C-alpha cells in the first residue's frame, strides 16, 4: 500500500510540475485544479 501512495504522490507532483512549466513558458496558459470523486469509489485531480 505504501508503494501505491508513493506512486500516486509522484504522479500528482509530476502533473503539477508539467502544468507550472507550461504556464511559465506561455503566460496566456493558466491551469485550474479540478478534484473529483466517483460514487463507486475513487477519484482524481484534472
Image: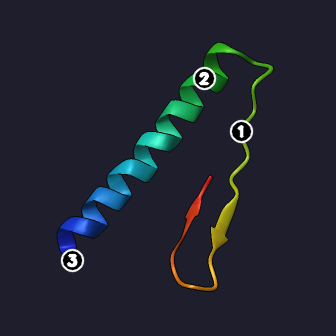
Spatial distance from mark 3 to mark 2, Cα to Cα?
32 Å
Percent position of residue 34, x then y: 70, 57
Q: Earlier in the sequence, mark 3 or mark 1?
A: 3
User: In this picture, is 36 found above or below 15?
Assistant: below
User: In this picture, is 7 found above or below 21?
Assistant: below
* Residue at which label 2 appears: 22
Q: Are marks 1 and 2 in contact (CB under 8 Å)?
A: yes
Percent position of residue 28, x then y: 80, 20
Q: Dot 2, crowdedness within 10 Å: few (<14), some or many (≥20)? A: some
User: In this picture, is 10 found above or below 18?
Assistant: below
Spatial distance from mark 1 to mark 2, Cα to Cα?
9 Å
At a point 36% along the width and 60% down the height, the residue shown is 8
Q: Earlier in the sequence, mark 1 or mark 2?
A: 2
At a point 75% along the width and 33% down the height, the residue shown is 30
Mark toward the viewer: 3 or 1: 3
The picture quadrant where one finds residue 35 is bottom right
- Classify residue 25 as left or right of residue 1: right
- Classify residue 28 as left or right of residue 37: right
Q: Dot 1, crowdedness within 10 Å: few (<14), some or many (≥20)? A: few
Q: Are marks 3 and 1 in contact (CB under 8 Å)?
A: no
Q: Earlier in the sequence, mark 3 or mark 2?
A: 3
Q: Residue furthest right?
A: 28
* Residue at which label 1 appears: 31
Spatial distance from mark 3 to mark 1, Cα to Cα?
30 Å
Percent position of residue 33, x then y: 68, 53
Mark toward the viewer: 3 or 2: 3
Q: Nearer the viewer, residue 38 or 1?
A: 38
The numbered dot on residue 1 is 3
At a point 21% along the width and 77% down the height, the residue shown is 1
Secondary structure of residue under mark 1: loop
Amino acid at each position: 500500500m505504501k508503494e501505491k501512495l508513493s506512486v500516486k504522490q509522484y504522479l500528482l507532483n509530476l502533473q503539477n510540475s508539467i502544468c507550472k512549466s507550461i504556464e511559465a513558458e506561455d503566460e496566456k496558459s493558466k491551469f485550474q485544479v479540478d478534484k473529483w470523486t466517483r460514487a463507486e469509489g475513487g477519484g482524481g485531480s484534472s
